[in-house]
Amino acid sequence: MTEKTALRHRLAERGVDRQLLLLLPALLAVLILFVYPFAYGMGLSFQPDEGGVLGAYKNFFEDAYQRDTIWTTLQLALPAAFLNVAASVPIAYRMRGRFRGKRLLTTVLVVPITLGTVLTAEGLLNFLGPTGWFNRALLNAGLVDAPLRLTNNYWGVFLSLVITGFPFAFLLILSYLSGIDPTLERAAATLGAGWWPRFHRITLPLLAPGLATTFCLTFVLAFSVFPSAILVGDPAGSTRVISIAAYHAAYEAYDYSLASAIAVVMGVVELAVVAAVLGVRSLFYTGSTGGKG
Amino acid sequence: MTWLRIKSVTRRFGGKEALSGLTLDIEQGEFIALLGPSGCGKSTALNCLAGLLPLSEGSIWQDDQRLDTLPPERRGFGMVFQSYALFPHLSVRRNIAFGLQMRRLPRAEVRRRTDEAIKLVRLEEHATKLPGQLSGGQQQRVAIARAVVLEPSLVLMDEPLSNLDAKLRLEMRTEIRRLHQSLGLTTVYVTHDQEEALSMADRLVVLRDGRVQQIGTPEELHTRPANRHVADFMGYRNLLPMKVTAVTPAVVTVEGAGLALQGTAVGTLAAGDEVVAAVRPEDLQVGEGGVPVTVEVVEYQGRELAVEARTSQGTMLHLRAAERPAPGDRISVVADPARVLVFPA
């Protein structure tokens, strides 16, 4: 009897007790809904109809039309993620305190996240299209001779990624900023630091890990862009992103092996970028920021 | 010689006055304590001085220069925050050097003065550590070093000892006083601890509900509090609502709540006035012919015993006794009229 209690006690010391059973439902869901399909897709990618185990990958990388989708997607996702983070920082920094109308302003900035890509794309087409308000205003003002091409090309998709990605980045950065103790900046002020040294020597270094995380998340979101690449992009040419390539392989060529291989490549590219960013992040201070966050 | 002049400084938050008309002249090298319960406006006053809060009214002058219109970074005051506010991503050395670097001093001088400041607070072994790796007392010393390394014309301290344990608090109290004496820095120190204020400051400013109650030396405040609120804060634990029955130039006689006392009037009083009689527990003694009371609680406090006793009408009295009475004992309590202060209610 005594030995039995002792064993249970020893296990509990290492965090093994009956509460672990609470993890079971979640674990089951992850296994069934994520791990199994992932492993299945992974397996598919190594079983092409011809060409051996790596045949699908060989197909993808040997065909410049397919291979270039990686570069096309990176060209969209990296600048979009970068711009979203860069634009969020000053706005969130300005909004970190309390002021009248803050909630309204936050709502306005965050609303696009609820719109969905399709509505955003429609709005972009109407507003920025060759006969949209924007171009008509420019033409009437005599600023341009011919309408600017801002949709059905790279810029349409880029703008769509910014519109849907910005609220996300903004919310994250706002919460990271409110996690930094505001007394630190006040202390810096009493030590003679003006607003710029206060920002770049105190706030920015403390915010850097948060910026890295935000960049990774918005990048991953942008990298899997699909609807807007078709609706406001040029899906056969300049915005033939990697998810379109996978879609074609799966549902037009019915080559599930190639489609799975493309999906795996997508994941690997995302992982590589995330790893690079987090690698840079580890060079910064990543400890407590003294605030409530 | 007046050096810093605070003229009727007022600060309102949403129409409510957190600080009303603070007027204070500070001499160079003085150690001033702002004392009061939480919410009395003492931190507001300090933040107004530091420039972290704009004034609603009033002005602050240093010699002939108006300060209240300058941003904090141009006032040249050092500040020690209650939470220390050390930069968590910078080492102790770089925390202390921060202000010197902001002044764009030559690298060699920054280095020399930082070294001196580190030595002053005895943190040589910890210079390369991050604040998170230090104990509370060490962080406190970094915060002080960071503020004084700039040799500021005024050091502001916002309850700097409130996060430390009792023993460390006593040590740091002496340390701050020692630094004040050796560097001759003018200091404004905010605290809610009357003992701390009395022991450290040259002059105290007692605040309540945003208003100054009394300004004076520790001795003045301790022996002659200006009103019942200051008395309350200065350890007059027995505050008894009573009525004046007789007034002579030397003593007033007051009655009420089942006891009669003789005391010293603060301000002019006439027979029939409603008053508050204030007595320290240590000034109430067990003795013949006084007020009869029943002992309720006895606490051992080392050199003496703290006793709570109740009069026949139910008024609670706090007193000290040398010998241990038992709860339920009936004793008689007397007080020296000079030590009983009678304030208008």
Image (cartoon, coloured by chain):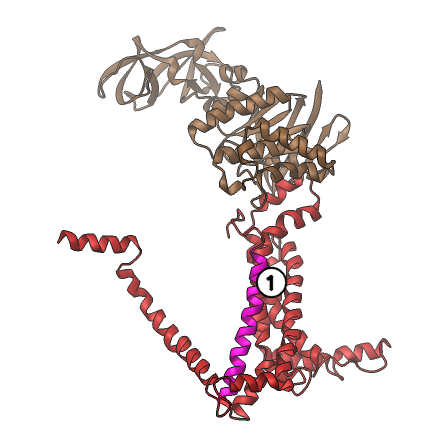
Chain colours: A red, B brown
Image coords of residue A203 (percent x, y): 62, 50
Quadrant of res B328: top left
**B331 lies left or right of B158:** left
Q: Which residue is drawn at 77% across and 30% down?
A: B65
- Numbered disc 1: what chain? A
Main SS, magenta residues:
helix
In the image, farthest residue toward the front? A52
Count residues near mark 1 (Cα–Cα under 10 Å), then give few for <14, some for 14-19, many for 20+: many
**A8 lies left or right of A88:** left
The answer to whether residue B58 shows anywhere in this view is: no
Asked if residue A121 is among those painted magenta in the image, a careful observer would answer no
**B75 lies left or right of A215:** right
User: Hey, what amino acid is under mark 1?
Assistant: Phe
Magenta residues span A257-282
**B339 lies left or right of B96:** left
Q: How many marks on residues? A: 1
Quadrant of res A215: bottom right
The answer to whether residue A138 shows anywhere in this view is: yes
Secondary structure beneath label 1: helix
Image coords of residue A267 (percent x, y): 53, 75
Image coords of residue A133 (percent x, y): 75, 79
Above/below status of B25 relative to A76: above
The residue that label 1 is drawn on is A170
Above/below status of B90 relative to B227: below
Q: Residue at x 33, y 23 (%)?
A: B315
Quadrant of res B276: top left
Image coords of residue A76 (percent x, y): 65, 74
Asked if residue A265 is among those painted magenta in the image, a careful observer would answer yes
Taking depth in this image into account, of B274 and A228 the one nearest to the observer is A228
Taking depth in this image into account, of B18 and A251 the one nearest to the observer is A251
Taking depth in this image into account, of A2 and B224 the one nearest to the observer is A2
